[in-house]
Amino acid sequence: MRLLSRVCILVALASLVACGRTHHKVRHWPAQKFYDRAVSALKAGNNHHAVTLLEELEGDYPYGRYAAQAEIVIAYAYYKSGESQAAIEAIKRFIRLHPTDPRVAYAYYLEGLVNFNKNKSMIERAFGVNPLRGRDSTALRAALRAFETVVTKYPHSIYATDAAERANYLIDMLARNDISVARYYYIHGAYVATASRCKRVIEHYPRTPAVADALGLMAMAYERMGMVHLSRDTARVLARNFPSSRYVRRLRRAHILPGP
């Protein structure tokens, strides 16, 4: 038993020495070699190894011309390996340290992508689902802010067009998701919460089709709360701006709107 323990210790020490030699050898690479090897690792799908090499590069050449590039590529490597939080932290660090760097536009775009893909299952079942089943739109709202930053602050960047398309998609999704939540509240008799959620849609997403549903649900919620004048005023706004809305027919059947 003692002999086995001694053998294990010797093997462990040998491994540490070998690792130390490898590490020592790697740390003598020039910056470009670090970077090229990291890029090759990324292309091969070895994201964790890429991060290790880039961190070595940052440590050995903190003020070299590859240092800032290494920082943003580290963020991308974390993103590709599914480490969302580490990617976000790396992106925010890059933006904080290099606010005037031309690559900041890409940093914001990457931040949008990370948050956009943070929970794909949420996106895939975004509508018509019980809102209390753990679905959280925080990441999507963060993605929207990042994409909108690209569009407003860097409109001539190569990422602006795609960022704008993704932002529009998210705006529509978030608006419809709020309507799904409002319907859930209405069905369960939470009329104040229904009206509040509908108001948020109207205020934050005024150019989306969801506004018609928001007005209709709001009018119905006001009616259930006994706020007759508010209900009728809201219904009239709906009928004037969205005459073909299905809620117009429902409000007429409920005598909140006069018949045709």
Image: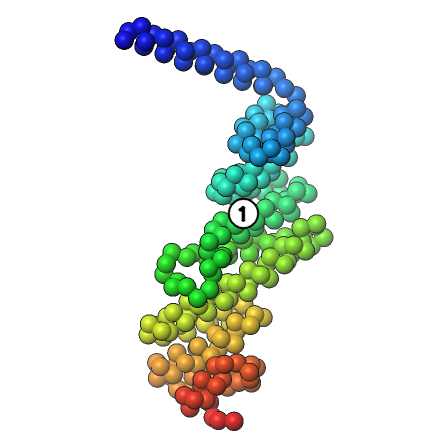
Which is more toward the observer, 104 or 15?
Answer: 15
Is residue 192 visible in the rendered image? The answer is: no
Is residue 166 visible in the rendered image? The answer is: yes
Please give the residue where the numbered disc 1 appears in the rendered image: 114
Q: Is residue 222 left or right of residue 120?
A: left
Q: Position of residue 67 (x, y in %)?
A: 62, 31
**Up-down relation of residue 154 to residue 258 (above or below):** above
Q: Position of residue 160 (x, y in %)?
A: 67, 54
Q: How many numbered marks are there?
A: 1
| Identity, as a three-letter code, of the amino acid under mark 1 | Val
Residue found 64% across the figure and 45% down from its top: 106
Residue found 66% across the figure and 24% down from its top: 33
Colour mode of the rendering = rainbow
Dot 1 crowding, Cα within 10 Å, few <14, some 14–19, many 20+: many
Residue that lies at the very extreme toward the top in this rendered image: 3
Under tag 1, what secondary structure? helix
Residue found 41% across the figure and 81% down from its top: 220
